[in-house]
């Protein structure tokens, strides 16, 4: 087991909250200590920070002060949450990057096994790779979503880095990747070859411009996501008040917090990863924004509403939309009267290809309304072209 490599949260930080009000987040969190037979299954969420950005090709603006981020986070007031939260502390960089990957994979894999949701503060975004590989041996196909201006697929001759990690995930065995989605890409930051490859692999990608007009478009994608990797350098410079951050266009603070909340609400989400913190200049504004994104993820988790997506659930209503009258072909949509969420049904053999996951794809009401106008939802069409059904 790799938990001996964890560095618990410092006593000096905890001492700052000795007289804190009972409503502060600090009072709702337990802190990991090195003891034998620690029962992780008691907890719903585990917080973990990782200090390794050696595979990053982005500028290293500062040594991340995780204590300062935690201090901003623990000073916030908690909601009326019932979840049990554990702060595991910190993983320092190993002798090699591979050593860090090994420790991250082993720790997070055990947390997945105990059904503990992970809230991870990076390191560089290539750490998405061990977070993804932590699903190995879980007999689980992974939906991975990156919130990023770039696809990070890289090229065949490119060294492994935070700009090529997704390419390695796609080709690396065992093949656990079921689908990859990107939220927020900017066309001018991605080579045409990468854009073409996303189309050829039938991966999902939503431009930042579309999300800027309607951030709720991310919800169906995040609802189906197991691992969400958020590159914080996709947040625009004016929001971070960082004149060295060359991102004039990007997400603002409210959009970042909204996506964090949607991520927490996803019943599938096992890991929410905030990466590339070292690429932003240190400031109190930055620490507060990361703390608030963490808060919104926890708020989203509290709002989770598990639903049985089967015929036994009387809160589900089915709507059928004809797409080929001659061949009696139709699309079947399902709406939850409890949450007002929508799904589109797929044929039964789709279920087998996704390793016994339910045969429903998350969608929006607009997808249903478009289908009524004769437009087949893009997500359904991409899945069909993949050969899943």
Image: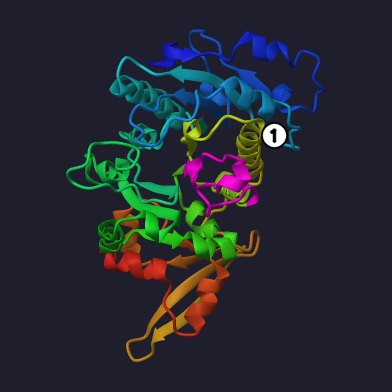
Q: Residue furthest front?
A: 243
Say above or below: 379 vs 128: below
Q: Is residue 335 visible?
A: yes
For disc 1, the marked residue is: 82
Say above or below: 147 vs 318: above
The residue drawn where x is 39% and y is 25% is: 104
- Provide the residue span drawn in magenta: 230-254
Closer-to-camera residue (338/146): 146
The residue drawn where x is 29% and y is 55% is: 353
The residue drawn where x is 49% and y is 42% is: 233
Figure quadrant of the N terminus: top left
Say above or below: 383 vs 39: below
Residue 39, horizontal then vertical, whole percent: 53, 18
Closer-to-camera residue (89/92): 92
Residue 116, horizontal then vertical, whole percent: 51, 31
Residue 217, horizontal then vertical, whole percent: 54, 62
The residue drawn where x is 44% and y is 15% is: 3
Q: Is residue 169 left or right of residue 378?
A: left
Mark 1 crowd level (few <14, some 14–19, many ≥20, 10 Å Cα): few
Closer-to-camera residue (241/77): 241
Figure quadrant of the C terminus: bottom left
């Amino acid at each position: 087991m790799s938990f001996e490599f964890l560095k618990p949260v410092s006593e000096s930080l905890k001492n700052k909250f000795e007289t804190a009000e009972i409503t502060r987040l600090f009072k709702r969190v337990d802190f990991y200590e090195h003891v034998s037979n620690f029962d992780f299954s008691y907890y719903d969420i585990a917080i973990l920070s990782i200090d390794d950005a050696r595979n990053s090709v982005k500028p290293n603006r500062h040594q991340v002060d995780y204590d300062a981020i935690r201090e901003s986070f623990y000073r916030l007031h908690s909601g009326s949450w019932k979840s049990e939260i554990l702060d595991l502390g910190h993983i320092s960089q190993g002798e090699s990057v591979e050593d860090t990957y090994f420790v991250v994979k082993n720790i997070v894999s055990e947390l997945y096994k105990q059904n503990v949701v992970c809230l991870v503060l990076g390191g560089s975004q290539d750490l998405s790779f061990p977070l993804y590989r932590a699903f190995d041996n879980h007999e689980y196909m992974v939906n991975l979503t990156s919130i990023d201006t770039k696809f990070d697929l890289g090229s065949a001759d490119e060294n492994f880095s935070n700009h090529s990690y997704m390419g390695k995930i796609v080709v690396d065995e065992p093949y656990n990747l079921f689908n990859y989605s990107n939220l927020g890409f900017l066309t001018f930051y991605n080579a045409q070859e990468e854009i073409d490859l996303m189309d050829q692999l039938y991966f999902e990608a939503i431009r930042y411009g579309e999300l800027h007009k309607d951030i709720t478009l991310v919800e169906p994608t995040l609802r189906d996501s197991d691992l969400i990797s958020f590159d914080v350098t996709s947040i625009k410079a004016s929001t971070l008040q960082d004149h060295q951050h060359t991102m004039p266009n990007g997400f603002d603070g409210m959009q970042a917090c909204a996506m964090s909340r949607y991520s927490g609400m996803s019943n599938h989400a096992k890991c929410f990863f905030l990466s590339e913190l070292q690429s932003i200049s240190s400031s109190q504004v930055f620490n507060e924004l990361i703390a608030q994104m963490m808060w919104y993820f926890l708020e989203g988790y509290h709002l989770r509403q598990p639903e049985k997506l089967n015929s036994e659930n009387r809160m589900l209503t089915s709507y059928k939309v004809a797409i080929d009258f001659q061949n009696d072909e139709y699309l079947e949509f399902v709406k939850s009267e409890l949450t007002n969420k929508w799904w589109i049904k797929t044929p039964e053999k789709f279920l087998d290809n996704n390793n016994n996951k339910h045969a429903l794809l998350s969608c929006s009401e607009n997808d249903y309304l478009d289908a009524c106008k004769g437009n087949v939802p893009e997500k359904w069409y991409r899945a069909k072209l993949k050969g899943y059904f």
